[in-house]
Amino acid sequence: MPYSHAHYAGNLVDGAYSLGLFGDVATEMCIVTDGDEGLFASYADVQFTAPVRAGDVLEITAELVKVGTRSRTLDLRCLVVGRGRPDLGESSAEMLAEPIVATTATGVVVVPPPTDRG
């Protein structure tokens, strides 16, 4: 997480950044499952459970939990798997023994009907 994304005291990154990353993994999921980028339709039950800070290393996951005719429901998670350690040196960092769940959400994406896909 670059320091240019820190917007708040303590080098905190705004929660919306996680939602943008969720959009990226949802796009990948749609390409893998349907051969199309798809479009995000909605988020539900967004939970910001821990802070994301500049210098963090994030892992974003999407699990496909429901397939409709054109909709795909995803469980999304943003994990902090590494954290900058400026207290030890300007570029010091460490990988965490246990990831920190920073953000979770359920997302729904839609893809074109099969006849519209190339």
Image (cartoon, rainbow, N blue to C red):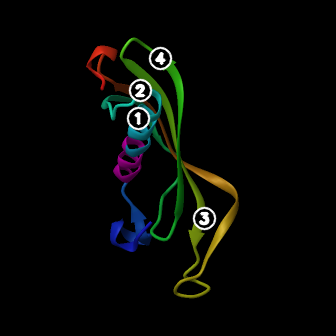
Please, what secondary structure does the residue beneath circle 1 have? Answer: helix
Which residue is rendered at x = 62% and y = 85% of the image?
Answer: 88
Left or right: where 113 falls relative to 77: left
Distance between the Cα atoms at labels 2 and 3?
A: 32 Å
* Residue type for callout 1: Ile
Circle 1 residues within 10 Å: few <14, some 14–19, many ≥20: some
Distance between the Cα atoms at labels 2 and 4?
A: 11 Å
* Residue type for callout 3: Gly
Q: Which residues are magenta?
A: 15-23
What residue occupies the far front of the structure in this picture?
Answer: 118
Left or right: where 118 falls relative to 29: left
Q: Are marks 4 and 3 in contact (CB under 8 Å)?
A: no
Which residue is rendered at x = 41% and y = 26% of the image?
Answer: 34
Task: Say which mark, if any, is on residue 67.
Answer: 4
Q: Which residue in the protein does label 2 denote?
A: 34
Q: Which of labels 1 and 4 is toward the front?
A: 1
Which residue is rendered at x = 42% and y = 64% of the image?
Answer: 12
- On-image quarter of the N terminus: bottom left
Q: Which of labels 1 and 3 is toward the front?
A: 1
Circle 3 residues within 10 Å: few <14, some 14–19, many ≥20: many
Comparing 64 with 82, the one in front is: 64
Q: Position of residue 10 (x, y in %)?
A: 44, 71
Q: Are marks 1 and 3 in contact (CB under 8 Å)?
A: no
Q: Which residue in the protein does label 1 denote?
A: 31
Q: Which image quarter: residue 5?
A: bottom left
Q: Position of residue 87 (x, y in %)?
A: 58, 83
Distance between the Cα atoms at labels 1 and 2?
A: 5 Å
Q: Is residue 51 above or below residue 92?
A: above
Q: Which residue in the protein does label 3 denote?
A: 82
Q: Which of labels 2 and 4 is toward the front?
A: 2
Q: Earlier in the sequence, mark 1 or mark 3?
A: 1
